Image (cartoon, coloured by chain):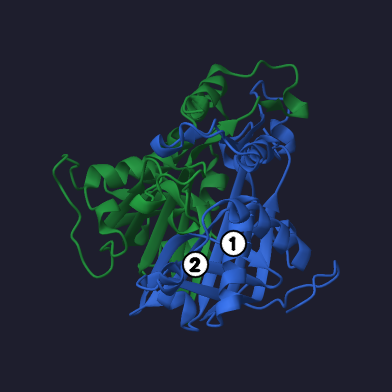
Chain colours: A green, B blue
Amino acid sequence: MTSSSASEEFPRSAQNRVRRVPDRGSYDQRSVYQVLDAALVAHVAFIQEGSPFVIPMLFARQDNRLLFHGSTKSRLMLALASGQPLCIGVTLLDGLVLAKSLFHHSMNYRSATVFGSGVAIREEAERMSALRVISDKIMLGRWEYARPPTSQEMKATLVAAVEIETASTKVRLGGPKDDAEDESLPIWSGTVPLSPFAGPAVSDANSTNLPVPDHVQQWRASVNRTT
Amino acid sequence: MTSSSASEEFPRSAQNRVRRVPDRGSYDQRSVYQVLDAALVAHVAFIQEGSPFVIPMLFARQDNRLLFHGSTKSRLMLALASGQPLCIGVTLLDGLVLAKSLFHHSMNYRSATVFGSGVAIREEAERMSALRVISDKIMLGRWEYARPPTSQEMKATLVAAVEIETASTKVRLGGPKDDAEDESLPIWSGTVPLSPFAGPAVSDANSTNLPVPDHVQQWRASVNRTT
């Protein structure tokens, strides 16, 4: 496990170097971890029989690795656990950037790109602990509350860990950057912020007589804090 | 160009066949197009020097192709225009699905996976028309309103079209599917819907004396209609 002191950077290579608009790029571990921790879904790219594939997955970061879980029958989970090279992309779209010129239109976003390869976690206590990290990341409080996995369910579950070999983030913030000669044009420019919104919880037919638990309401509040 | 009658399906192959939970999968063109049209960002996967890469991109669908634009200097844009095999993933996260058992926790989503390869659009009128399709998809009304591209700006822009060779969607809707023996457990189960929220437009310093145009307010309303 790699420590995550503020000054550490991931190694730069042809793989992870931010080429377009490099001043939006960063190799700082803390920046990469922040973007990863803010996202629920990652897009995992891998190669199978010479073709690229990309599949969305729930995930969590633990120290310098990403944890995934799925069915032991999943093609993606087998790729994730096989040691083959992976590229994992995480993107948070924070807004549209509307410039006076069409050319300078853009979007505000935080993205992270991770390179690494995965292994299956085999040891039973470590598997259970990794599942808890994933559960806690998606919704804190759910793990202690819901019915725990049976040994049968654990047998059907593959848990994979991808050590982050290298990574980068790319972030765009703020308003449009118009050309000086366009600044006085009578065209409205600015940004429209975008954020996820969590609506009211909908009880299942088997739970209509039960109150919505605090951890669900707290999760909604944490998602909606930014809106 | 392929027509989009309701009955047409993309060919099924080892590439696009939905293996896990196949009843969530569809190869219907209209279903694929609906998911593509609902998303602003696509994750484009390609292979470079034997390694997988995945990069987020704004895009639009026109008939049976996906349109992308970017800098002529972008590594991704060159890959998009090179004819090499691409896999393009689009994911809309619609909610968390909270079951009584941890094992049956899930998410509601609409995802599309597209396979194809791209070419650069060279003809000037077609390039301009493709840029307009992209602009109209992201925010209808902006193209007519903002300052049009100059020939210099057009020279710096690469526009690529990816014909959809095959594709599939995978969609999960509705509440948790708990095991029969768990249904009476005193554990709250249900869903928490997620949707994008567009906040109030923020005027740029160069536009504080101008009203926020109707097309921007209408865009906000269309994003927020689902929330």
Q: Residue B226's spot in the image, x, y percent?
A: 70, 36
Q: Residue A191's spot in the image, x, y percent?
A: 48, 40
Q: Chain of mark 2?
A: B
Give the mark, 2 or 1, whose residue is nearer the N terminus: 2
User: Which label number is shown at residue B69?
Assistant: 2
Q: What residue is shown at x 45% (from left), y 65% (from top)?
A: A45
Question: Pointer 2: residues within 10 angstroms few (<14), some, or many (20+)?
Answer: many
Asked if the residues shown at circle 2 and circle 1 are in contact, with their CB atoms under 8 angstroms apart, the answer is: yes
Q: Residue B227's spot in the image, x, y percent?
A: 67, 32
- Is any part of residue A125 visible from this angle? no
Q: What residue is shown at x 85% (from left), y 70% (from top)?
A: B5
The residue to which callout 1 is attached is B134
Observer-nearest of A152 and A196: A196
Q: What residue is shown at x 28% (from left), y 68% (from top)?
A: A15
Observer-nearest of A6 and A212: A6
Q: Is residue A116 above or below residue A126?
A: below
Observer-nearest of A108 and B25: A108
| Quarter residue B135 falls in | bottom right
Question: Pointer 1: residues within 10 angstroms few (<14), some, or many (20+)?
Answer: many
Side of A195 where B132 appears, left or right = right
Query: Which three-letter amino acid code belongs to the residue tagged 1?
Result: Ile
